[in-house]
Image: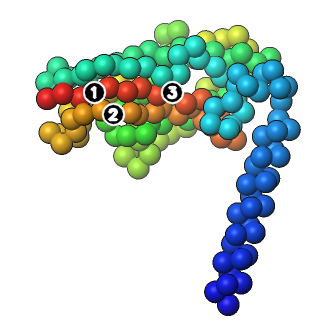
Amino acid sequence: MKKNLTGIIGIAIIILIAGVVVAISKSGDPENKKANLIDGFPGNLTTEESAFDFGAVSMAAGDVSHLFKVKNTSAAPVKIAKIYTSCMCTTATYVKGDKKMGPFGMPGHGIQPKINQILEPGAEAQIEVVFDPAAHGPAGVGKIERAVYLEGESGLLLQLGFSAVVTP
């Protein structure tokens, strides 16, 4: 019985992986697909800077922030359904013109409302990322890497990352 269950689970995993590979290989124009793939998910948002290094950041000096520019490079509008972060020490705010939405944080740490913002073809917005180096207390010193995720209705559109070396 245990061998049959293990075999069935193994076959199911292989079928799932094959399905994902086929779906990715059939999506979109090959030229655009390379520029718009983030961790295997097709997307219509791009950024010139997907990662930022704050360098050495002192807990005593307080929060640091960085603005990431995102652009809809497709011919159709893109709906950003939600924004969230990988850690409670990080927040992200959607900024387009005079409009600001957020800050948004880590799922499970407060309400994560959908923002449902439409970015028209060729339009740009900014994602303001704020990192609190003191959020993890004295044990939080050393190298860190965090991420901010922008999702559409059907999955990940873009991932933005940053790193720092936290000092006391």
Indicate whether 58 appears above or below 105.
Answer: above
Camera-nearest residue between 38 and 97: 38
The residue shown at (37%, 40%) is 87
| Residue beneath the point at 30% across and 32% down | 143
Q: Is disc 2 surrounded by few (<14), some (14 to 19) or many (20+) residues within 10 Å?
A: few
Q: Which residue is mark 1?
A: 165
Q: Which residue is mark 3?
A: 160
Q: Position of residue 150 (x, y in %)?
A: 56, 31
Q: Is residue 115 left or right of residue 168?
A: right
Estimate the x, y position of residue 35 in percent, counting from the top left. Answer: 70, 22
Residue at the spot 74% in from the left edge and 67% down from the top edge: 12
* Crowd rating for badge 3 (residues with CA inside 10 Å; few <14, some 14–19, many 20+): many
Q: Which residue is mark 2?
A: 144
Q: Amino acid at mark 1?
A: Val
Q: Is residue 17 left or right of residue 159?
A: right
Q: Nearer the viewer, residue 20 or 100?
A: 20
Q: CA distance from mark 3 to mark 1?
A: 18 Å
Kindly tell me whether residue 116 is visible in this rendering: no
